[in-house]
Amino acid sequence: MPVSLLKTAIWLQNTPLFIFIRQADYGYYLTLACHLTSISLFAAMIVITDLRLLGVGLRNYSVADVVNQLRVPKRIGFVLAASCGFLVFGTKAEEYYYNAFFRTKVVLFILLGVHALIFRQRIYNHPEELDKLPTLPANAKIAAGLSLLLWLCIVMAGRGIGYLHPPPLSHHFVYPD
Ligand code: HEM
């Protein structure tokens, strides 16, 4: 990766917000705990929505009921999980810059963006259309299957981050007096 990304990571971890989180008692651990807690809320919404789209769960409810009613909590969960993830990242950005699992996670997020571009408008934003069909179409099932797969890989990559050690001398932290 270009050096400028590394410089940005070192700059970010030395901004006042991240110096504060690093130095506060339990600051880093509380941020990580918030990341995990919001992920559990968010993951539940993803799993329920995608299982309904696959046709294997909540079949007594219409697709529109499940997708539409979970849309707002799903978005709130995502914003919370992503914001807390960013706070965790910024606290030790230089260290995470070198982390292969963190890089994998970034690539998986890009793939999720592509997934959203392809399927959000057609499937997730118009679930009423799916209820008019006699059976769930293949593209809805493919969208749901890929979504579940990508999110599972993101969780695995996230867990993997903690197992890799940064290279020596990769802690350019500012320590205020
Ligand atoms: C919104 C969806 C996300 C999911 C499902 C997710 C998932 C996870 C999981 C499962 C962990 C493992 C935590 C642990 O085992 O203690 C983790 C850790 C982490 N995540 Fe996320 N994450 C998400 C978003 C983000 C974002 C947007 C960022 C950064 C911009 C991020 C950065 C991190 C970092 C830096 C760790 C720390 C791992 C460590 O040092 O042990 N995450 N994530």
Image (cartoon, rainbow, N blue to C red):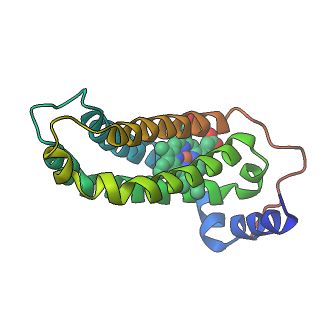
Q: Is residue 156 above or below residue 122?
A: above
Of 153 and 161, nearer the camera is 153
From the viewer's side, name the closer residue of 102 and 162. Answer: 102
Image quarter hosting the C terminus: bottom right
Residue at the spot 81% in from the left edge and 43% down from the top edge: 166
Say which of 35 and 177 sits in front.
35
Q: Residue 68's x, y, as percent?
A: 19, 54
Q: Can you tell which quarter of the image residue 20 is in? A: bottom right
Q: Position of residue 161 (x, y in %)?
A: 66, 39
Tell me what residue is drawn at x 75 percent, y 44 percent. 99
- Horizontal side of residue 32 vs 13, given as left or right: left
Residue furthest top as drawn: 56
Q: Residue furthest left?
A: 60
Q: Is residue 31 visible?
A: no
Please say whether residue 164 is visible from this viewpoint. Answer: yes
**Left or right, 137 with reference to 30:** left
Residue 127, image x, y percentages: 21, 51
> Vertical placement of 138 versus 34: above or below?
above
Report the front residue among 18 and 8: 8
Residue at horizontal 44 percent and vertical 52 percent from the top: 81
In the displayed structure, would residue 70 be above or below residue 54? Answer: below
Q: Is residue 100 above or below residue 19?
A: above
Where in the figure is residue 141, as x and y percent of width and height? 35, 36
